[in-house]
Each structure stands twice: as structure tokens, then as C-alpha cells.
Amino acid sequence: MPLEKIRCFIAFDIDDETILTRLGETQEQLVRTGADLKLVETQNIHVTLRFLGEIAPQLVNSIQEEMKMVKFSSFDIELRGLGVFPNLRHPNVVWVGIKKGAEELKGIFAQLEPRLRALGLRPDVRGFSPHITIARVKSGRNKTELIAQIAQMENLELGVMKADALRLKKSILTPRGPIYSTLYEVRPQI
């Protein structure tokens, strides 16, 4: 019998307590608009470098080996400004932007993507846009108020953190929300 597949992604965790507190306060401001939101729990907030989807367990070791080949130095990530995907008329995801550190993240993605494709993983068709997701919009309720609040926060400074651990994460979906655990991590080699 084949082993059950594992839902995985590669990310940098946001684990700076000051930033997490500020993100929680930002989420509270969004909730006060009365919009229909599903917030990302602060312990689950991260910068997704590559969503892998449901993968065979035997692929995990190969992914770890490819992650070891990625060269990067420790760098700062500055979190600043709010926005939405796909656009303000149809907001589905509320995100915080990454200013400083975006180029480093793109460089790591550029090293990782061909290695993952060589393992047979499908290409990420959406490309890579450095951000962190803080909420998902479930309906159009109070959309105008939500958009107005996001516009007021478009330059909000949330802080700077050190990116020094690229992690392969496992995601178990539950009715109460996802549960993430770290399967493997790579530290800077440069």
C-alpha cells in the first residue's frame, strides 16, 4: 500500500516576537472593519518560498538534499505595507509586503525552483512574489471598509527580522486551521 502523501512548503518562519505582536495588532485592526476574514494564526505566519503541495514521503529526502545545495547568507527582511491579491476589487488574500530582503528571497527561489522541477515537481505557475499572508477574505461583507483600512496601512512599518533558516514545512489541514511542523532546515552557508 502506498504511503500517504504529505502537504509541504518551503519557507522562512516569522519568529520575531515584536513583529508577531505588531502583526497581531494589524490583524485586529482589519477585524474591526467587520469584514469576513479568516486570520492566519501568528504562530503560522511565514514567508512561503515555494508551495510543494501533496508530495510522496520518499521525495522528502531528495528535497532536503536539494535544499542543502542552495547558497545564501543571513539577511534582513523588512516587513512594510499591506496589500491584497488578486486586486482591490476582488480581495481574496491580505498580505504584508517585503521591502528589504525581497531580492535575496528571489535569488533563493531562483536557485531552488530548477532543482525542484528536476525532481519532477510542477513549476510554480504564479511565480514568486515576496510577501506574508495575514488573512483570507471569505466574503464581500464590509469590503469597502476593509479596503479603506488597508489603504491607510499601505506604508505601515512592521519591523525588520533576520532570515537565517530556510525550512521545509509539513502542513496538516484541520477544521481549526493548519498545523505546521518543521521537517528540515538549512542555515546560511556563505
Image (cartoon, rainbow, N blue to C red):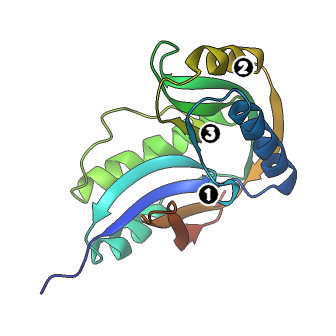
Tell which circle, 2 or 1, labels the residue nearer the N-terminal end: 1
Q: Residue at x 44, y 57 (%)?
A: 9
Q: Is residue 68 visible?
A: no
In this rendering, the label closer to the viewer, 2 or 3: 2
Q: Which mark is residue 104?
A: 3
Q: Secondary structure at mark 3?
A: helix
In front here: 116 or 36? 36
Q: CA separation, marks 1 and 3?
A: 22 Å
Q: Are marks 2 and 1 in contact (CB under 8 Å)?
A: no
Q: Tell me the kind of residue under disc 2.
A: Gln
| Residue position marked by numbered label 1 in the rendering | 44
Between disc 2 and disc 1, the foreground one is 2
Locate the C terminus by quadrant.
bottom right
Q: From this viewpoint, is residue 55 visible?
A: yes
The answer to which of 31 and 161 lies nearer the viewer is: 31
Which residue is most to the left?
1
Residue receiving disc 2: 149
Q: Amino acid at mark 3?
A: Glu
Describe residue 188's horizontal placement relative to residue 57 as left or right: right
Residue type at tag 1: Asn
